[in-house]
Image (cartoon, rainbow, N blue to C red):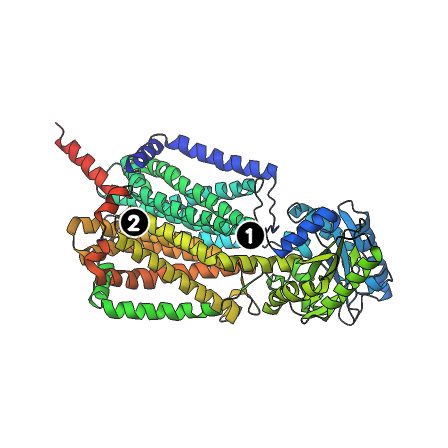
Amino acid sequence: MTPLLYKLGSFSTRHRFLVVAVWILIAGGLFVASSVAGRDTSNNLTLDGTGSQSATDLLENRWPSAANGANPVVLGAPKGEKVTDAKYQAAIQETVGRYEKDPAVQAVSSPLAGTPQSARLISKDQTVAVISISIKDSPSELTVAEGNRLVDLASPARQAGLEAGVGGYIGNAVSVPSVDLSVIIGIVASIVILLFTFGTLIAMGMPMITALIGLFSGISAVYLLGQVVQVPTIGPTLATMIALGVGIDYALFLVSRHRQQLGLGLEPAEAAARATATAGGAVVFAGSTVILALLCLAVVDVPILSAMGYSSALAVLLAMLSALTLMPALLAIAGRSVDRLRVPFLSIEKQEKTTGDGGWARWTEGVIRHRIPAVILSVLVLGALAYPANQLYLGQQDNGSFPTNTQARVSYDLLDRGFGPGANANFLIAVAINSSNQGAVQQQLENLDDSLSKASGVASVSPPSISPSGTAATISLTPTTGPSSEATSTLVGNLRETTIPKAVKGTSLKAYVGGTTASYVDLASLISERLLLTIGVVALLGFVLMTMAFRTLGIALISSLMNLFTVAAAFGITTAVFEVGRGISLIGLDESIPVVSYVPLMMFAVLFGLSMDYNVFLMSSVREKWLASKNPNRAIIDGLASTGRIVSAAAIIMTAVFLAFVLNGNPIVKQFGVGTAVAIIIYATLVRCVLLPATMSLFGRACWYMPRWLDRIIPSFSIEGDSYFEGRDSEQRRAP
């Protein structure tokens, strides 16, 4: 890999201006293409083999117009007034009329129709009313622009003084909080950290330029990917978080190695090419590990999760490619000016021209001297941090945690106020009718409806609606608890296992529990079943890659265990914050919420990959020292000392980027941001600086054990390739 990367680096430095121009064209081209194709996402859930998917399939086959369910347009009267007051009647009727005339709307139910069914659309205190609309577009087909247009149709009600919020999948489509502020804060924090790390504006600027061009290209590519697969709404946000962090980190490592090479007397172009061949090898290995970990989300076999993995992996790939090609080109253009425009009061003389750091060496020596207490204390602390994870409940997104100015939150609050928490968690009971005897079918449906209404945890049940063909029916069921409540998940299971089978036994009916709430309950169940499998696959993959990279079973095993300890602690802290409620107000939430079912899985894939990043950069140096001295403790001390400063800077940047996204209004983004940020903090401090060196010192030479038969059969490659240049330089010196 080293010769190939050296050729790539040399090409980029020789054709520096061409490479920069090509990247500008790539970024611009992807942006234009994604703009023309459309930047639409979809939260459509396809969960083969589940009850909710069976309900959807049944309606799509027998009653297509009912398959998408209804979206509520919720109207709330000002304090002390009622929606039934005469002054609001004309505005409500006009709003209903606008939806009825709109070609995108299939059906409208008015709260003022004067029928028993319409009376159910007005709260008992008459302060909240619902206009129920069914649209032609499915969740996967609805665009943000179309969603906003449908929201605007409720303007007569708003102009009359009513509060209006559109819920359902329309509300979710238009309620995506902006990531702009988080990105800006992450960039500013990274600039400050890079200035303290390098001490010059030029050295700081190049990683930022490289990372931003890679990010810009990556996110545009993610939106283009959305034309092929259904990328969820949160996909581009998660991809932005990850790609921004790794993009800056990868460029940081290359600049650091480049400055080391300059300090050794190499010409700028040669230094940049060698930095690409050495630090670039670690970038390729680390980036590939992150990408493979994200692609392993496909093991769960849930399209929405696979799409999240694909989109984030694509963004990481472009961040990695920009670091490997654009970065050496910029370094060659800068030449020796990389250390110009120094920041006052910051010395750069010792930053990259030496390979060790006395402070880091002394710290590591102290840890090694007290290795047994260090291991015991570290494990106890990690165990305490991980302990809350035993309370982890995989729930679903609750729109009650969204910003109060979003359509999803306005709708949620109004429904909760007028109809109770269960109004936001309606189930759609899809019924297959396999008889032409209308009288018998009607009686069977009424019996089913009665059985559902008597089930524990059910607040209300609507009368059955029968399709024009007479082959399908739907019943809307409202639970007593909200969508994120564990009791709601329990109700789904009870209805499927007990209530419905008893009610339809011996009849011509077959019923399924569907709808958004039931779909997310099924998603949580699938993830729970496959979580350990996915963790096992990713961990095994990491172990194999580390074994190949460092030619030792001990280091691979220790590194994998360190990563698992880190992830377990992150799970524990995430549970403590969001489900137990420790410090919940500090991140902009009013009350505790469940951890969304796919967040731990996504966190694990990302964190395992990112932990591998830092492991690779650290252990590459440790292995180099080990091969030189064959002294295990000396290798640990020198390896940690030579990478301490730069890996710390990379970890601080990554932490700052992820914490910046905690400001995002989406609770899922908050959970991901908190979990990943604390994991990086834990790994960069407790694990990297205490547990890892203490454990390696405890096992000594055993860490470097590798069976000869295994060493012969696995592929051999050097990550950073320093030996390649040692041999090359030696041959050149011997040449006449």
- Horizontally, residue 460 falls left or right of residue 349, namely right
Q: What element carries label 2?
A: helix
- Residue at 37% x, 39% y is 324
Q: Where is residue 297 in the image (x, y as percent from the top left)?
A: 48, 50
The residue nearer to you, when weighing 294 against 176, is 294
Q: Position of residue 717 (x, y in %)?
A: 28, 41
Q: Name the residue under label 2.
A: 547
The residue nearer to you, when weighing 207 against 712, is 712
Residue 234 circle label: 1
- Residue at 24% x, 63% y is 363
Q: How crowded is mark 1: few (under 14 residues within 10 Å), some or many (20 or more)?
A: some
Q: Give the mark, 2 or 1, whose residue is nearer the N terminus.
A: 1
Q: How far apart are marks 2 and 1 (CA)?
A: 34 Å
With respect to residue 580, does 511 lie above or below?
above
Task: Say what amino acid the circle numbered 2 marks.
Answer: Thr
Q: Which of marks 2 and 1 is in front?
A: 2
Q: Where is residue 444 in the image (x, y as percent from the top left)?
A: 78, 61
- Horizontally, residue 629 falls left or right of residue 61, namely left
With respect to residue 673, does 5 lie above or below?
above
- Residue at 37% x, 69% y is 383
